């Protein structure tokens, strides 16, 4: 049997009852397969046996000690158990903070193996960070000197409990476990057998064996992933469509109406997208760009070529506020050219909704801009030819597919102002072409960023007051909407009142956050854009798409609570015009040196791609992509930062396989169907070919 076929409930393992089952479920473990794929997060190398005399000179030691005596020190709830232990080389004290149950375990005269960190304090050797294992005369000493796996846990589940379950699970599958890697690939990449790799990743006998086991499982996982991406590309290229060649009249008419010229990056990317649009098969491209680099304008220009060819275009936007802004801008630019633009969201109801849907179905709307309502039931397009997804990281793969299913193999253009590092883009979006806009429009000045420690806010407030006196506007961003008992942080609602009444009493302030009614958000933003509001107080709802040319100050309080890419996005809300703009990042007093280094990284760079690389290193790919990207392969053991070499090897082998056997008929992996289906296909045809 293949590993993915071990779907028997984990309760079938000896020792798993209802209570333990619920605890395992909290870790996402319901089946035998899921248990075996619950890989250790790290390991403890306890192979070196020490004595207490060596404890002070070592980070951690593995010592066999005898319990001499026990005593309670302190009073009341602060009372702790102190246990004196020793070996032939000396004595030490074990301080059992929060582990009073050990009073019934550490009995005088008994022997225990102790793995821990010892320090000399109060003229004695002490350890409070330690693990225990009772000494058993029947076991050989070498059995205590081993590499131990350390697993991710949940409340009520111990390392020993999960290790015991893992041993039972391995014993159950070892005899019948089939190989997933083709023999040629296994030999070429010096991989272990699947059973050997699983045994060694959970219970390695040496660090070399552990490294080889991890290499095997990482390569296998990445090969599955690369085969899925390559298969997706092949399926898409096998779809045939006919679209009249580009005329370019509408697109040129738009460019002629602009008061400025597109940058070299914008023109290059526009050519790349238009090449996709007139291939004999549907295209799929990811467009990345700096904040304010003009991605939306490029997308609209490309959309005109599709509209001129007789097809419709749908632009999916994450928020109604941003969708309305895009809709207004598109109408102003395109309607004078004869392009029929419409806005659609869940708030469009009644006769207006019926009229819009009828017009869309009859082909009387060329460009529809809106929120999730674009792919809701009852929305029908006459001839949907291009799907544009703005801020794509805020949508899941299933949502993209729902919109693509509204047309007959439309092209797909994903856009993101949060640049994704090259390594991550190739991994998570390997089935897409990637375009980048790195340069800003002419005349834009880089935003100057300042750091301010909490307690120095008044200096920042004074700078903001000066900028507003010169005709600018400001944003104030907070991590919370309202006061929290659990977090000692400023919030938008209370600070709005304080700023309005105490700090800037003579200025006009507005407030928006996710709980503000959509109509009020739109009204407040319209007033801010019209210059009727001087300071806009908000949460990170501002991160996406707000474009006000006069806004010249961005103040972010508790800046350490935001990711680097989030800070860069927020900073990009200012500097949209020709005036010099500023970002003030106010950080908490107790910020660590690492935290300060993070903020200095964004202070010293305005390159979103460079910042994204730093953010990826700090937050990791899962956080970076966001949980919405549920259709992407969820790596169980591979790491996109450290496993770049096996990634390239897997891609090379996948391409070789698909070039020789596009249908994967001969591949020695009967379970590949389930692996591929898990990736989230771009087209329904892809699923049908499986």
Image: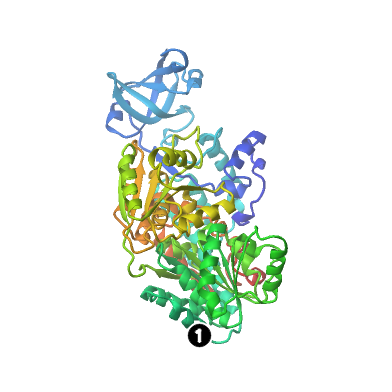
Number of numbered discs overlaid on the protein picture: 1
Q: Nearer the viewer, residue 273 or 506?
A: 506
For the residue pair 434 and 91, the one nearer the viewer reads as: 434
Q: Say whether residue 519 is left or right of residue 380.
A: left
- Find residue 363 and report its horizontal and vertical position in percent: 66, 77
Which image quarter is the N terminus in? bottom right
Residue for point 51% across, 78% down: 276
193 with respect to 471 (left or right): right
Place of residue 653 in the rendered image (x, y in percent of width and height, measured from the top left): 47, 69
Do we see residue 213 in this rendering?
A: no
Colour style of the rendered protein structure: rainbow
Question: Is residue 558 positioned above or below 390 on the image?
Answer: above
Examine the rendering and report whether any part of residue 485 can be seen.
yes
- As drawn, the residue found furthest toward the front would be 506
Residue at x 63%, y 45% (from the top left corner): 30
Check disc 1 and report the residue beneath it. 249
* Disc 1 crowd, CA 10 A, few/some/many (<14, 14-19, 20+): few
User: In the figure, 145 relative to 302: above or below?
Assistant: above
Front-most of residues 53 and 264: 264
Quadrant in the picture for the C terminus = bottom right
Q: Is residue 83 above or below residue 204?
A: above
Using residue 458 as the reference point, say whether residue 149 is left or right of it: right
The residue tagged with tag 1: helix, strand or loop?
helix
On screen, residue 345 versus residue 626, left or right, reads right
């Amino acid at each position: 049997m293949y590993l993915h076929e071990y779907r028997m409930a984990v309760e079938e393992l000896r020792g798993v009852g209802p209570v333990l089952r619920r605890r395992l479920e909290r870790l996402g473990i319901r089946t035998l397969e899921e248990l075996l794929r619950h890989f250790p997060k790290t390991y403890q190398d306890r192979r070196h046996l020490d004595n207490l005399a060596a404890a002070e000179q070592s980070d951690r030691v593995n010592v066999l000690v005898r319990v001499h005596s026990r005593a309670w020190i302190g009073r009341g709830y602060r009372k702790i158990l102190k246990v004196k232990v020793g070996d032939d080389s000396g004595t030490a004290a074990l301080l059992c903070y929060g582990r009073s149950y050990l009073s019934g375990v550490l009995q005088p005269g008994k022997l225990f193996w102790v793995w821990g960190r010892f320090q000399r304090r109060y003229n004695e050797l002490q350890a409070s960070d330690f693990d225990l294992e009772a000494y058993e005369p029947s076991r050989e000493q070498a059995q205590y000197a081993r590499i131990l796996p350390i697993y991710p846990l949940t409340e009520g589940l111990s390392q020993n409990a999960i290790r015991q379950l893992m041993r039972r699970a391995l014993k159950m599958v070892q005899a019948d476990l089939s190989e997933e890697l083709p023999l040629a690939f296994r030999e070429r990449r010096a991989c272990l057998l699947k059973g050997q790799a699983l045994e060694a990743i959970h219970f390695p006998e040496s660090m070399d064996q552990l490294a080889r086991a991890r290499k095997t499982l990482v390569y296998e996982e990445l090969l599955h992933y690369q085969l899925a991406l390559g298969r997706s590309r092949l399926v898409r290229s096998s779809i045939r469509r006919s679209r009249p060649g580009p005329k370019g009249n509408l697109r040129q008419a738009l460019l002629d109406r602009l008061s400025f010229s597109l940058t070299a990056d914008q023109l290059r990317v526009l050519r790349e997208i238009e090449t996709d649009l007139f291939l004999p098969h549907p295209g799929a491209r990811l467009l990345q760009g700096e904040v304010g680099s003009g991605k939306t304008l490029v997308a609209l220009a490309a959309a005109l070529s599709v509209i001129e060819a007789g097809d419709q275009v749908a632009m999916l936007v994450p928020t109604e506020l941003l969708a309305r802004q895009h809709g207004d801008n598109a109408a102003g630019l395109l309607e004078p050219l004869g392009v029929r633009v419409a806005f659609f969201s869940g708030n469009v109801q009644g006769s207006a909704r019926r009229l819009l849907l009828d017009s869309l179905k009859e082909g009387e709307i060329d460009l529809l801009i809106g929120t999730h309502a674009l792919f809701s039931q009852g929305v029908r397009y006459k001839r949907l030819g291009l799907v544009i997804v703005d801020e794509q990281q805020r949508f899941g793969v299933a949502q993209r597919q729902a919109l693509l299913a509204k047309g007959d193999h439309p092209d797909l253009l994903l856009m993101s102002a949060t640049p994704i590092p090259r390594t991550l883009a190739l991994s998570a979006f390997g089935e897409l072409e990637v375009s980048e806009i790195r340069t800003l429009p002419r005349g834009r000045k880089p935003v100057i960023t300042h750091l301010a420690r909490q307690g120095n806010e008044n200096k920042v407030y004074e700078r903001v007051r000066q900028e507003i006196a010169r005709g600018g506007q400001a944003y104030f961003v907070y991590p919370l909407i309202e006061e929290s008992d659990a977090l000692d942080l400023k919030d938008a609602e209370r600070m709005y009142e304080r700023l309005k009444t105490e700090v800037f009493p003579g200025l006009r302030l507005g407030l928006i956050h996710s709980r503000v009614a959509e109509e009020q958000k739109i009204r407040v933003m319209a007033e801010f854009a019209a210059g009727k509001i001087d300071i806009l107080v908000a949460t990170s709802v501002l991160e996406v798409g707000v474009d006000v040319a006069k806004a010249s100050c961005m103040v972010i309080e508790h800046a350490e609570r935001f990711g680097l890419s989030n800070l860069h996005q927020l900073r990009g809300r200012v500097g949209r015009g020709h005036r010099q703009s500023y970002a003030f990042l106010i950080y908490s007093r107790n910020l660590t040196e690492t935290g300060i280094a993070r903020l200095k990284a964004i202070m010293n760079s305005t390159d979103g791609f460079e910042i994204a690389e730093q953010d990826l290193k700090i937050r990791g790919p899962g956080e970076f992509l966001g949980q919405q990207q549920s259709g992407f392969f969820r790596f169980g053991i591979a790491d996109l930062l450290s496993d770049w070499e096996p990634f390239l090897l897997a891609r090379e082998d996948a391409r070789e396989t698909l070039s020789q056997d596009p249908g994967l008929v001969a591949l020695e992996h009967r379970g590949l169907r389930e692996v591929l289906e898990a990736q989230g296909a771009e087209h329904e045809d892809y699923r049908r070919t499986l």
